[in-house]
Amino acid sequence: MEESNFKQVRQVLLGILLANLLVAGTKIVMGSIIQSASMTADGFHSLSDGFSNLVGLIGIHYASKPEDKEHPYGHTKFETLAGLFISIMLLFAGGKVVLGAIERLKNPIVPQITVESLVLLVITLIINVVVCVTEYKKGKQLGSQILIADSTHTRSDVYVSVGVLMTLAGIRLGLPPIIDPIVSLVVAGFIIHAGYEIFKETSDVLVDGVAVDSDEIRQIVMGFDDVRDVHNIRSRGSFNNLNIDLHIIVDPRLDVERAHELVHDIEDAIRARFNAYAQVIAHVEPDTEDGRD
């Protein structure tokens, strides 16, 4: 990712951090006032959004550093580490909500729901929707794994807030108060699911899981007339830190200059398809019986 992109990601995270802190504070304070387990749980979910923004800012700070002697491939995996930490925070937050909901099931409290509390929840919901859409679009535009992961976190907050709003409105209309802690358990399910999804994506990057479809790479490479076969296709990393290497089989009589041009053409074609900044290495082998050393 270019330095200018890192700066834009940092600016987006700072703006979203302020929005998340405002939303979280509003939900927690109002949830405590009206004694609603689901609304308070939703507030802590939003607060974890703010914490994830802080983690993202730290990750981006280190990921934006250039290559050096100790890190010849750069520092971009710090962004992935930040995403992994966000997932762990979400799993812990989900566990905390579950424990709180169980306590409320044992000792139920009737929420004192007001029109003002419902209006504030609607306002925070609108803010969450705007934040989620903006962050996801920016993440795709800038190729930022941390923004995409964080938008997934925020999207779960939107679903949760809708459920909480419906719950509180239902209680005010006469539904039994027991649904409040039950809905907070549903909130916990969304939080834990979001944490799992982010954990799966970031851990795949850290353990060098396959990043792109090998068959798609093969199709690109076999489109060149001088290539007779391709094998040992490997890929790892994330969208903004993609690494691909492969072996191509060519006519043994192909001169060095043409082979060199072919390799560059193949690398450019792969970058054009996946990522302009991808690190692509193509190894040339002659088409002989013992050519695959």
Image: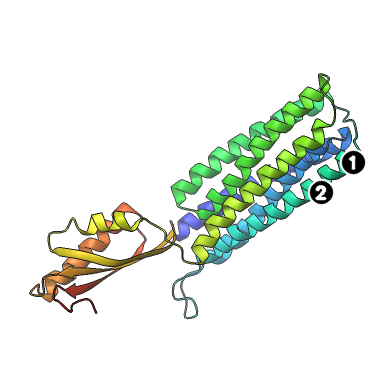
- In this view, the residue farthest toward the front is 289
Residue at the (81%, 19%) spot, across then down: 173
Q: Is residue 32 depicted above or below 64 in this figure? A: above
Of residues 8 and 192, the one nearer the viewer is 192
- Res 54 → quadrant: bottom right
Residue 32 appears at what percent x and percent y? 86, 38
Of residues 74 and 160, the one nearer the viewer is 160
Instruction: Give the mark nearer the N terminus: 1 vs 2.
Output: 2
Label 2 sits on residue: 99
In the picture, measured across the screen, residue 217 lies left or right of residue 10, that is left
In this rendering, which labeled residue sits more in front, label 1 or label 2?
A: 1
Label 1 sits on residue: 106
Residue at the (22%, 59%) spot, across then down: 221
Dot 1 falls on a residue whose secondary structure is helix
Disc 1 to disc 2, C-alpha distance? 11 Å
Decide: few, some or many residues near mark 2? Use Cα within 10 Å; few <14, some 14-19, many ≥20: few
Residue 285 appears at what percent x and percent y? 19, 74
In the picture, measured across the screen, residue 161 lies left or right of residue 78, that is right
Residue 130 appears at what percent x and percent y? 59, 35
The answer to whether residue 102 shows anywhere in this view is yes
